[in-house]
Amino acid sequence: MRMWEQHSPAWQRAPSFPRGRTVTLFRMPPASSDPQRSTSQPLRSIWIDGTLVPWESATVHLLSHSLQRGSLVFDYLSVHDTPRGAAIFRLPEHLERFFHSVALVGLPLGYGREALHAAAVETVAANPGAHSLKICAYLPSIEVDVVPMDEHVAVAIAAYDSARDIVLRKEKPRSFPATVTLKIERTRRRIEAHLPPHAKAASNYLGPMMAKWAARKLGFDEVVLVDETGHLAEGPTTNVFLVDARGVLRTPPLDRVLAGVTRASLLELAKHEGIPTSEDPVRPEALLEAPEVFLAGTSAGVWPVVSVDGRTVGKGVPGPISLRLKARLDAATDGRDRDFEHWLTYVRP
């Protein structure tokens, strides 16, 4: 279950979505039913360099290199409830991307894939009810130069429930919409020469954050960025898909975007569903003409777009291909699709 699926809106349970209905994805549970909100005890434990430490003790100094220079590298995974217990979705693929990001940034990581695979499983097992998993590599030392004298790269792995452990503990929890109003951001372009978009590094998210924050103030839910050539790139934490008039599922090619694991999963699922796909450069104007548009990511899953730059997409509700792919992805992540059970790493086989 993804962080926003604890209270499934209507379109997630049925093939249609009532026009004009407002749905929020987080609802504050009664205080009596949420003991975590009334206790000062540690909610979770976080794996740091081989040791599980209490959630509130997982800290670094304000002047640490990764905080000051943006050198932290991370990957974000989902954990799902299945008939065989908790399972991590596509852990090997996420670790492959994590190590690629580490190499692009140049961090001298001292861990191998097998060690972090085992650590991820250990962390999820130590945190029952977790649905999110984040792996971070960072330089915790205080430094005076952009190149650290202390080259120790720490690794932290956190398993938690995004809604209960983070969002609902805010003074003013935010509601997340079931469908998206999207803005095309044409001014803050992603420039590959600065840092390749394939690196999930903290510094790569500053521009997207600025763009999304500005779009929120204008009333949009999300933004999609363009690259230096003027073609569609991606959202701050999502890949973008559209279905064209021919019924072809299109998405920008990998040389322009982060190699999203959910993106790759949906392209493979589409082939199994007999849906033609195309990975090719996409002009922003194609979103305005498409009968279906959706975003895709680890926490978002399949997130239908109902308007782009204020113009309604299709009929203003999730389209049939979006719903088919969402249903197939949900079955795969929940352990109900035997064809894709190999995508799951069970915590307690």
Image: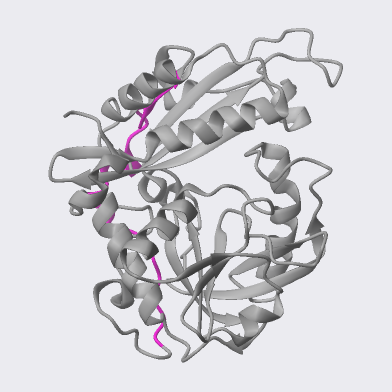
Whether residue 39 appears in magenta in the rendering, the answer is yes
Give the quarter of the image for residue 66.
top right
> Residue at position x 20%, y 54% from top?
337
**Residue 146, position as x, y percentages in the image:** 84, 21
Kindly identify the residue that appears in the image at 35 percent across and 25 percent down.
123
Q: Position of residue 251 (x, y in %)?
A: 57, 65
Quadrant of the image occupied by residue 281: bottom right
**Where residue 95 sits: x, y (%)?**
47, 31
Measuring from the top left, give residue 21's x and y in whole percent: 39, 86
Find the magenta span and give its range. 21-47
Vertical placement of 21 versus 185: above or below?
below
Q: Spot the residue most to the right.
A: 145
Counting labels gives 0
Q: In this view of the protein, which residue sits in the foreground, 16 or 215? A: 16
From the viewer's perspective, is residue 132 above or below residue 327? above
Quarter of the image for residue 25 reads bottom left
Q: Is residue 296 above or below residue 138?
A: below
- Residue 226 falls within the magenta-colored stretch: no
The one nearer the camera, 29 or 343, is 343
Question: At 39% from the left edge and 23% from the top edge, which residue is drawn?
Answer: 117
Q: Nearer the viewer, residue 85 or 102?
A: 102
